[in-house]
Image (tube, grey):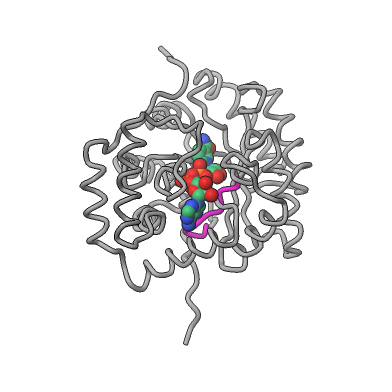
Amino acid sequence: MATQTLQLRPLGNTGLKLSSVGFGASPLGKVFGDVSEQDAFAAVREAFRLGVNFFDTSPYYGGTLSEKVLGKALKALGVPRDQYIVSTKCGRYKEGFDFSAERVTRSIDESLERLQLDYVDMLQCHDIEFGSLDQIVNETLPALLKLKEAGKIRFIGITCLPLGIFTYVLDRVPPGTVDVILSYCHYSINDSTLEDLLPYLKSKGVGVISASPLSMGLLTEAGGPEWHPASSELKAACRAAVDHCKEKGKNISKLALQYSLVNTDISSILVGMKSIKEVEENIAAALELATAGMDEETLSEVTDILKPVKNQTWPSGIQQS
Ligand code: NAD
């Protein structure tokens, strides 16, 4: 009998094939609570063993800690560099935002050193709604194109929360400048607004990564972190959905991850993971989806509970004219 493996999906025009479940490494920066280095290494190793080939981090996560821990963990795998795909970011730091050409050019060298790598597969401008979009278009992205030419990065991405920012930038840069977008909290059971943007992104040949299928912890039994920006109404609705699943003996995180994985126009669903247990549960959820499909009954009940807050989001970024 053939062993079941995690699906690989093409990423826009990049030629890369990402595992449908990607490893979000922000928890390795302790943003969701303490994580020992041992647990972090074990989680990365187990994810890779089970078919995850895509790892995402940022200098912002844990003030560079996530990059350092991920770098060590990947090195410890002892496998050829072309067997895993690494994405990091630039422009957002513990100290604040800086999307200047000078800063992002310095940033990649710092990231490569922390990650112990010669290049990253993707460098993404991190949360651009906090920067000047004119600067992103006219200064930051041209600087990243130079880094591409220099071989330090293979592909260029942008990340942000408000979906309209993606179209604003993509409509103002030459085709092929932005290879990939990373959206978060817009393709999970409580908010699926990314779906409307997918045909546009496809027409532009831009690869799509969707992060935070568990709504940054709201769709987990442990709940979201204290800093979670959702309204108390949205948090309470998610808590009610979690409780409902618990009472039924169902796992809301499994349901939520499977919901996000169904749409194959999204190349990878990035889920934050910090332990072998979470990795194994999430990969099992993906494999089970492929063979058994979803628990439609529970999904329908959870959808009903979340209906009053469906597609509710929160403000993010600076006002731009
Ligand atoms: P998420 O929705 O993936 O939730 C992560 C939380 O859920 C963590 O506390 C994790 O420990 C927990 N979890 C994971 N699997 C679980 C399971 N099976 N059972 C119970 N709990 C489980 O949110 P996220 O981590 O913010 O997003 C995923 C990744 O996407 C991040 O790590 C980051 O790499 C990326 N991301 C990027 C941006 C951006 O670029 N602006 C924004 C958000 C996320």
Work out whether residue 181 can be spotted: no
Could you say which quadrant of the image residue 164 lies in?
A: top left
Q: Is residue 120 left or right of residue 32?
A: right
Residue at figure coordinates x 70%, y 50% from the top left: 36
Residue at figure coordinates x 38%, y 42% from the top left: 201
Q: Main secondary structure of the magenta part?
A: strand
x then y, percent, for residue 130 = 51, 22
Measured along the vertical axis of the image, is residue 19 above or below residue 50?
A: above
Decide which of 288, 20 is in the foreground and name it: 288
Work out whether residue 168 can be spotted: yes
> Looking at the rendering, in which quadrant would you find the C terminus?
top left
x then y, percent, for residue 299 = 26, 56
Magenta span includes 129: no
Decide which of 300, 77 is in the foreground and name it: 300
x then y, percent, for residue 57 = 62, 43
Q: Is residue 110 left or right of residue 4?
A: right
Query: Which range is magenta?
Result: 17-25
Decide which of 231, 112 is in the foreground and name it: 231
x then y, percent, for residue 40 = 67, 54
Q: Residue furthest front?
A: 247
Could you say which quadrant of the image residue 288 lies in?
A: bottom left
Q: Is residue 107 left or right of residue 295?
A: right
Measured along the vertical axis of the image, is residue 100 above or below residue 111?
A: above
Measured along the vertical axis of the image, is residue 253 above or below residue 311?
A: below
